[in-house]
Image (cartoon, rainbow, N blue to C red):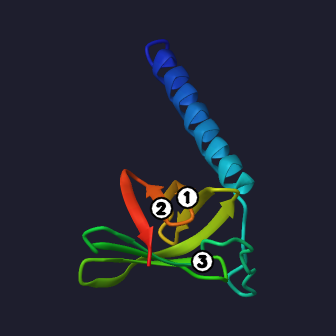
């Protein structure tokens, strides 16, 4: 039993660390602004509409109900989710759990994930 004690202690420490990481992740998700998909809340900002990369490959449609629909190439609705605009900053939460953000540098230009999208 003496030889197993260090293994048991390490297992307990690893389990506690994993639980702590899960609890922190849940806390972070709970701090994210939420929007109900059953009763859409309208976004009050001037950026609603279509945003497209110069080559036309990526297209973000920011809908007034706080949802977005992203097309990539010929793939329509490649990604969908919700978004929140605060000032000139945008946060995205994809329906699959992916998160991203961006900055509107002016009324016609959005910088997002290393890309430049322009208002259409």
Q: Are marks 1 and 2 in contact (CB under 8 Å)?
A: yes
Q: CA distance from mark 1 to mark 2?
A: 5 Å
Give whichever of discs 2 and 3 has the lower sequence position: 3
Kindly indicate the quadrant of the structure image that contains residue 39.
bottom right
Residue under pointer 3: 48
Viewer-nearest residue: 18 or 109:
109
What residue lies at 51% left-to-right and 63% top-to-bottom? 97
Q: Position of residue 36 (x, y in %)?
A: 72, 78
Q: On screen, 84 above or below 12?
A: below
Q: Is residue 2 left or right of residue 85?
A: left
Residue under pointer 1: 106
Q: Which mark is residue 109?
A: 2
Count every numbered label the image shows and give the total: 3
Q: On screen, 26 above or below 65?
A: above
What residue lies at 57% left-to-right and 65% top-to-bottom? 107
Q: Which residue sits furthest front?
A: 107
Q: Is residue 25 left or right of residue 75?
A: right
């Amino acid at each position: 039993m003496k030889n197993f004690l260090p293994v048991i202690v390490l297992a307990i420490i690893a389990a506690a660390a994993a639980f702590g990481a899960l609890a922190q992740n849940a806390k972070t998700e709970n701090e994210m602004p939420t929007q109900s998909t059953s009763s859409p809340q309208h976004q009050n900002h001037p950026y609603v509409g279509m945003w497209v990369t110069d080559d036309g490959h990526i297209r973000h449609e920011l809908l007034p109900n706080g949802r977005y629909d992203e097309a990539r190439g010929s793939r329509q609705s490649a990604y969908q989710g919700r978004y929140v605009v605060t000032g000139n900053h945008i946060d995205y939460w994809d329906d699959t759990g992916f998160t991203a953000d961006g900055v509107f540098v002016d009324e016609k230009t959005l910088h997002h994930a290393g890309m430049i999208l322009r208002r259409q």
